[in-house]
């Protein structure tokens, strides 16, 4: 497949219909269409014609929108799509004369381009945060196998591991989204210059080229009107599926290395982490733990007492997370292969035999996850060989799918009836769904954690994602933030890069920079390629250990806040990491939509890290608000740009005025987080007016009991007058547990009055002076208050 060539409108024939016709006529063929308002300004356009007999996408889309809300959009078969704001301002229209075009099996829609348009989303791309001026296609790749390594290490390979054909169009402070529910190699063009051999424009044609389409597959396009980016993202997330609340331990720090194979390896890492008092929740196994790289096996020389050894590690609070690849060794003496052969679950080739690739075990066959019986078979092996020994999470890799030296176009689906292109981008999605079902088969009331390399629309329902095999250099550090942000805006918020880079040797300075930048990413995993230097937090020198340990501990201190962001994600689709213009309006004076080296963690915390191994002074854009500078312990005004000099210990970290942030008490040195025992940090500047509100949820962090009502929730309204803070507790439900709460303010002589429905307590904090400098909280401990 040509990755850098896409379909062009000149090779398509476009419709020429009369207005209000029930069908669209193109080149003598009739296309029936259906335009439907699903509610809340979410619309679906479907087209049907014999060349696309079925919808092959297995994305799980849910239209749970309020249909009473009026639509501000329309579709006309002659004039195409018109999307307006609720106030009637036009945001998007079809290109006149080019509403819908076809060329054989291919189709595209072209839209009128306006020079004020800016583009975002597109799932996993390493092309920057803003995506104007590009042609791109969506095709899951095994990046290190499919691209030249110089491009991998220093360039911008496209496409990447994970395909979500979703485009965000920004017009001023209004936003629309276009989602193609299409599993083929969909394409998008955002007005690039058309060059010949990179030398000159192809012609003098002044038409712009803003279009989307696919080489095959039934057209099914969703158009969403925000109007804000936050509104848009919530609607998209509800459509494709919010992220189910993950287990608390999955949000901790994780340690992985290609080369960890045995109980001894993981036990050694665990001992070192505990020796250095570095909190950690997961110890990960790469392919070497298996017998001859055969999936669903454990090498007896590495794991002679499998269940007892896993129990020992988990007794220390460490989950063991093995890798699972889809390829099954073609070995007639191998139980897994024989089982799959009997069940008829393997992909076929054009010769109607089992498709064979060449991956880690050698000759390899592949489960056909397009079929329910295959997912059931896979789920059974997950339950038997993975979950039964005590494993609670896995990472699923090579599911792009990677087929080695074999041409993957010969890998067919649905008993050989579907071409490879129809399911390629969905392969990892089917694998994740089957893996999820396997864990629930074994332990129906336990939340599993699945991390995937590749994915598709709706992958958020079953798995988190890491952004694939990256490299330990400044370039990959700088691209990590925009890549993660666009994934979050595209409906996959539970993601993150490998820290401090998978390939290559990270220098001590680069390791520190990675941890400073990534310590609050939704996924925080330290992962390294075999043959490279060890990059565990304790493996460099005392300085690196001290600094990285501090940021890992700060993550654990903020776990109650991070966990509650996931509570909000599951309930409403809120993003976790998000660009500045998610929470703040953009304007010419302060163009937040151009900032890709800063980000918000939820609504309260902003990071502006230095992204070089040899950091230089940088500009920091402060949106309009007051901000608590964690480096200095001072409040500073926003709506401006400030300068920041790097230093060894700290990173630019800011807390928004009016934030109420739940944290763990004290300085965490282990991973024992109790969500019912917290500090509530009240960030209220002397200039704060009005009321700050926080809703906090606590549950067991492990089971689905919260879905049965076993969850404690409280809402607090906080107000400041001079040096007195009043906290009013309302809508409290202590169904899970009472809460033990310490209140922390940032004034030198603050007092707090806590008001509840049944009592009033005055907490005198005059002697409890706190400072959060460089992320380090210092001061006297306040006495906890028990609520409930």
Image: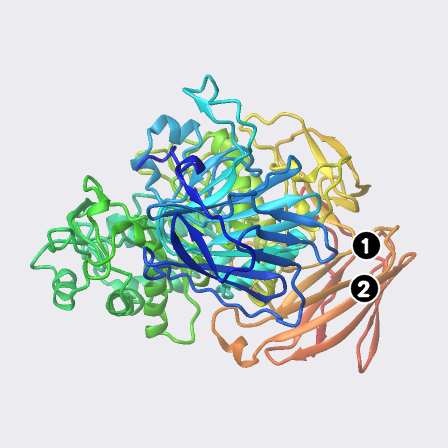
On screen, residue 548 above or below 667? above
Residue 545 visible at all: no
Q: Which residue occupies 56% across, 79% down? A: 710
Q: Which residue occupies 86% across, 58% down? A: 750
Q: Which mark is residue 10?
A: none
According to the image, label 1 marks what residue? 684
- Density class for disc 2 (Cα within 10 Å; few <14, some 14-19, many ≥20) is many
513 relative position to 379: left or right: right
Question: Residue 432: x, y in percent?
Answer: 36, 60
According to the image, label 2 marks what residue? 718
Q: Secondary structure at mark 1?
A: loop
Label 2 – label 1 distance at C-alpha: 9 Å
Label 2 close to label 1 by CB (< 8 Å): yes
Q: Which residue occupies 28% across, 61% down? A: 369
Question: Residue 530: x, y in percent?
Answer: 31, 38
Decide which of 545, 478 is in the foreground and name it: 478
List the single residue furthest toward the bottom.
758
């Amino acid at each position: 497949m040509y990755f850098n060539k896409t379909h062009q409108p000149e090779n398509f024939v476009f419709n020429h219909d009369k207005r209000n016709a029930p069908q669209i006529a193109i080149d003598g063929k009739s296309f029936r269409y259906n335009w439907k308002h699903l509610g809340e300004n979410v619309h679906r356009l479907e087209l049907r014609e014999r060349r696309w007999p079925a919808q092959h996408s297995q994305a799980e889309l849910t239209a749970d929108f309020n249909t009473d809300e009026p639509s501000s959009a329309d579709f006309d078969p002659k004039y195409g799509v018109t999307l307006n704001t609720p106030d009637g301002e036009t945001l998007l229209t079809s290109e006149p004369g080019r509403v819908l075009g076809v060329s054989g099996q291919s189709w595209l829609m072209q839209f009128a381009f306006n020079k004020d348009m800016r583009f975002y989303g597109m799932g996993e791309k390493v092309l920057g945060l803003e995506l104007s001026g590009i042609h791109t296609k969506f095709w899951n790749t095994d990046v290190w196998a499919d691209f030249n390594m110089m491009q991998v290490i220093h360039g911008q390979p496209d496409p990447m591991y994970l395909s979500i054909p979703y485009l965000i169009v920004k017009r001023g402070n209004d936003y629309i989204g276009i989602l193609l529910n299409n599993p083929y190699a969909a394409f998008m063009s955002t007005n690039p210059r058309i060059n010949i051999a990179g030398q000159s424009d192809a012609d003098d044609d002044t038409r712009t080229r803003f279009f989307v389409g696919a080489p095959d597959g039934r057209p099914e396009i969703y158009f969403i009107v925000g109007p804000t980016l936050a509104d848009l993202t919530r609607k998209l997330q509800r459509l494709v599926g919010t992220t189910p609340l993950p287990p608390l331990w999955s949000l901790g720090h994780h340690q992985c290395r290609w080369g960890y194979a045995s109980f001894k390896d993981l036990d050694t890492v665990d001992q070192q982490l505990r020796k250095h008092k570095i909190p950690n929740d997961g110890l990960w196994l790469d392919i070497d733990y298996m017998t001859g790289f055969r999936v669903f096996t454990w090498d007896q020389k590495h794991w002679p007492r499998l269940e007892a050894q896993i129990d020992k590690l988990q007794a220390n609070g460490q989950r063991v997370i093995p890798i699972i690849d889809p390829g099954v060794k073609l070995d007639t003496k191998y139980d897994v292969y024989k089982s799959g052969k009997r069940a008829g679950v393997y992909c076929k080739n054009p010769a109607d035999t089992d498709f064979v690739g060449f991956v880690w075990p050698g000759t390899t066959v592949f489960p056909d996850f397009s079929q329910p019986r295959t997912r059931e078979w896979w789920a059974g092996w997950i339950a038997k060989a993975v979950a039964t020994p005590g494993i609670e999470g896995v990472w699923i890799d090579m599911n792009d799918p990677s087929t080695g030296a074999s041409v993957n176009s010969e890998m067919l689906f649905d008993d050989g009836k579907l071409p490879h292109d129809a399911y390629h981008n969905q392969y990892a999605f089917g694998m994740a769904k089957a893996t999820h079902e396997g864990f629930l088969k074994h332990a129906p009331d336990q939340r599993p954690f699945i991390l995937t390399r590749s994915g598709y629309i709706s992958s958020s329902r079953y798995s988190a994602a890491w952004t694939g095999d990256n490299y330990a250099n400044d370039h990959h550090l700088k691209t990590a933030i925009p890549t993660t942000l666009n994934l979050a805006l595209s409906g996959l918020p539970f993601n993150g890069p490998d820290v401090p880079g998978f390939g290559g040797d990270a220098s001590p300075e680069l390791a520190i920079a990675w941890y400073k930048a990534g310590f609050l990413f939704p996924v925080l995993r330290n992962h390294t390629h075999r043959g490279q230097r060890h990059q565990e937090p304790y493996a460099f020198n005392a300085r690196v250990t001290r600094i990285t340990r501090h940021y890992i501990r700060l993550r654990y201190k903020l776990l109650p806040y991070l966990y509650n962001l996931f509570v909000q994600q599951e309930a409403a689709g809120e993003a976790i990491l998000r660009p500045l213009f998610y929470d703040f309006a953009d304007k010419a004076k302060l163009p937040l939509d151009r900032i890709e080296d800063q980000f918000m963690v939820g609504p309260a915390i902003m990071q502006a890290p230095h992204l070089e191994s040899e950091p230089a002074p940088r500009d920091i854009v402060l949106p309009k608000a007051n901000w608590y500078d964690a480096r200095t312990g001072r409040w500073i005004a926003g709506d401006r740009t400030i300068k920041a000099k790097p230093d060894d210990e700290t990173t630019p970290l800011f807390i928004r005025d009016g934030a109420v942030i739940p944290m763990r008490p004290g300085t965490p040195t282990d991973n024992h987080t109790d969500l019912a025992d917290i500090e509530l940090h009240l960030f209220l500047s002397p200039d704060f007016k009005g009321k700050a509100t926080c809703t906090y949820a606590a549950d067991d962090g492990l089971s689905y009991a919260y879905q049965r009502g076993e969850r404690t929730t409280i809402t607090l309204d906080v107000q400041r007058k001079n040096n007195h803070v009043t906290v009013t507790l309302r809508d409290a439900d202590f169904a899970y547990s009472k809460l033990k709460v310490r209140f922390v303010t940032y004034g030198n002589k603050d007092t707090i009055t806590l008001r509840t429905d049944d009592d009033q307590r005055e907490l005198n904090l005059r002697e409890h002076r706190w400072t959060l400098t460089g992320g380090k909280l210092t001061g006297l401990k306040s006495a906890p208050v028990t609520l409930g």
